[in-house]
Amino acid sequence: MERLIEAVLDIWERDGTSGTSARAISRLAQTPVSGIYHHFGSLEQLFLSAHEQAQRDSERWCAARLAELEGVAPLSRNAFGPLLAALIDQWCEEERRLAFAWRECQLIAAREDRYGPVAQRWTTMWRNFWEEVCARCGHPGRGAFTAYLFDGEATLHLMRWRRPVDRAGLEELCAGWNDWLCGRPARDGDWRLYARAQADLALPEQIITGGTMEQVAEAAADVLARDGMGALTHRAVAAQAGLTLGVVSYNFRSSAELVRAAFEMIYRRVVGRRGIAPADPVALSEEEVMARYRRPFPANDRTLSALDELMLAAARDNALASFAPQLRYRRGRTSGGMLQALLGREISGLEAALFSGFASGHRKACFGLPADEAAERSGILITQLREMLRPPSVA
């Protein structure tokens, strides 16, 4: 049983859910396929057991980190940023297998309601952990907020680009989060400005030029959103688009090109859902922003979950590593416009990135909740964030 669970966790780290067939698990565990059904009754129950094991291991990690802070008197608030960066980095570098298990749980919870309680246990664990950490650094009551930021940033930090730059940029982002918790604007740092400039230089040219290419890209995005990364093949996209396999292969010759097409189309959809062009001036009022966040997310809309899958694929697959700088350092263009409308002031690129990570983490924390409840929580959260960043003397 232990070997089978360990095999599932190893495959989730390396390949994701698409690689967790009964045959692949039994081969890695060096046990007959029948052993899965003998010990667990079904493949589904094996997956649930693996999630439970990952959660227990993660709880031990959290307890160990808190034990290392025992005896520490309440610190200055400015001590929080470096600690947050160190914990994110340690989690993503030393506990990658557990980090990917958490992500796989979130992805499946976005598609299947029965995984909602499992995903909510992760949410509760992280909220409790970060509440303890925040209390020791002068930020009591900010554990839930920080858990959302941790969720969003840890997803990105799993993607490896340039290790020194990524670590330095993470430090700047966490310092900016500490500024926000203190009610101060967050300013751009040199390392993140450098990384964004490099990401802009490395940005691939737009590959979807219309016509058949756009039809194929739309189909690729549909397959990814509906069935996940493992289903994104030339043959599946051809069937979705109603085209021949030869036509799809002619327009996008490699799997990487097909993924890039899906990514470009998914991004277009994300921007279209919010209704703001990435580089356009903010045209929404504060009331309109609040209304958008209180609006229930369509139950059958998997656009953002598809973006999550692309991030994990870029974190696993070296062939997709070129996506990492764009995903890590060019984010926030759409959510930044929302934040600027919400706060009524100019914002920095770092603040746009903070809001993007924060909103992403909160969205995933709502997996498994009824749509109306998730929308209500979103509205409350945005109100609380606005109050934190717009003190009475400024409002």
Image (cartoon, grey):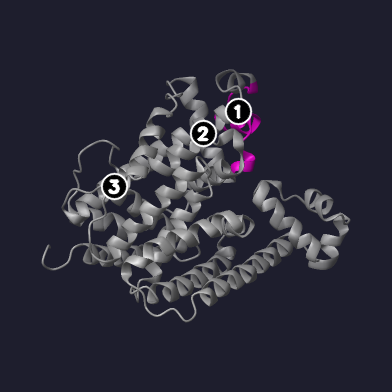
Q: Position of residue 234 (x, y in %)?
A: 63, 29
Q: Earlier in the sequence, mark 1 or mark 3?
A: 3
Quarter occupied by residue 375: bottom left
Residue 304 versus residue 349: which sits nearer the camera?
A: 349
Position of the N terminus by quadrant: bottom right
> How far apart, in angstroms, are the residues tagged by discs 1 and 3?
44 Å
Q: What's the residue at 31%, 49% (across, down)?
A: 350
Question: Which residue matches tag 1?
Answer: 238
Left-right relation of 76 to 316? left
Does residue 372 sit above or below 270 in this rendering? below
Q: Earlier in the sequence, mark 1 or mark 2?
A: 1
Q: What's the residue at 45%, 24% (across, down)?
A: 208
Nearer the observer: mark 2 or 3; the answer is: 3
Residue 77 versus residue 338: which sits nearer the camera?
A: 77
Q: Position of residue 175 (x, y in %)?
A: 34, 58
Report if the CB atoms under discs 1 and 3 are less than 8 Å apart. no
- Secondary structure under tag 3 reads loop
